[in-house]
Amino acid sequence: MLNDLLQLNANVSALFGFSIVGGITMLGKAFIKSYKTNKTVAEAKYKTITLDIEMLKESNRAILHGQLFDLCLKYLNRGYIKPVELRNLNCLYTSYKNLKGNGTIEMLFNDVSQIPVREDNTHE
């Protein structure tokens, strides 16, 4: 049996220029190199995606900040807020806080929560 394996290895070596063990070693090295390359590419893609997500969060936070700032000033200047506006404002504010928004909007939001909530039949 051992002689048969040695003969097979010699025949493979004569035909292909490498032995069975050498071929397995080459395949193993190629696999490891491919794995390392794919791992590096995957890590780079993960880093890029993570940065993209952070930029999107920052952009959304900035947009929400602008909307909340304008709406809060509008309601404060008017002196009251409609129920539907309050629900909308709460939704925007919750999203803003979840994105780690700052205290400027929190102060304005708290001020708006102190004004009367009422319906208005006039059209703006």
Image: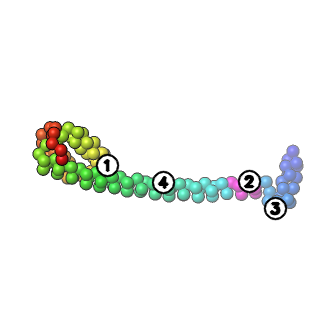
Q: Given this view, does label 4 or label 1 mark the residue nearer the observer?
A: 1
Distance CA(mark 2)–CA(mark 4): 32 Å
Question: Which amino acid type is marked by label 3?
Answer: Gly
Q: Is residue 60 left or right of residue 17?
A: left
Mark 1 highlights which residue?
99
Q: Tag 4 or tag 2, which sits nearer the N-term?
A: 2
Q: Tag 2 or tag 3, which sits nearer the N-term?
A: 3
Mark 3 and mark 2 in contact? Answer it, CB < 8 Å.
no
Q: Tag 1 or tag 4, which sits nearer the N-term?
A: 4
Question: Looking at the picture, how far across and down is residue 14, in whole percent?
Answer: 86, 60
Q: Tag 2 or tag 1, which sits nearer the N-term?
A: 2
Q: Is residue 115 above or below residue 6?
A: above
Question: Looking at the picture, how far across and down is residue 77, in whole percent?
Answer: 12, 50
Mark 4 highlights which residue?
46
Q: Is residue 11 above or below residue 112?
A: below
Q: Given this view, does label 2 or label 4 mark the residue nearer the observer?
A: 4
Distance CA(mark 3)–CA(mark 2): 13 Å
Q: Which residue lies at the image location 17% right of the left edge and 50% below the top edge?
A: 74
SS at mark 1?
loop
User: As rendered, which of 105 and 67 lies closer to the eye?
Assistant: 67
Mark 4 and mark 1 in contact? Answer it, CB < 8 Å.
no
Question: Which amino acid type is marked by label 4?
Answer: Tyr
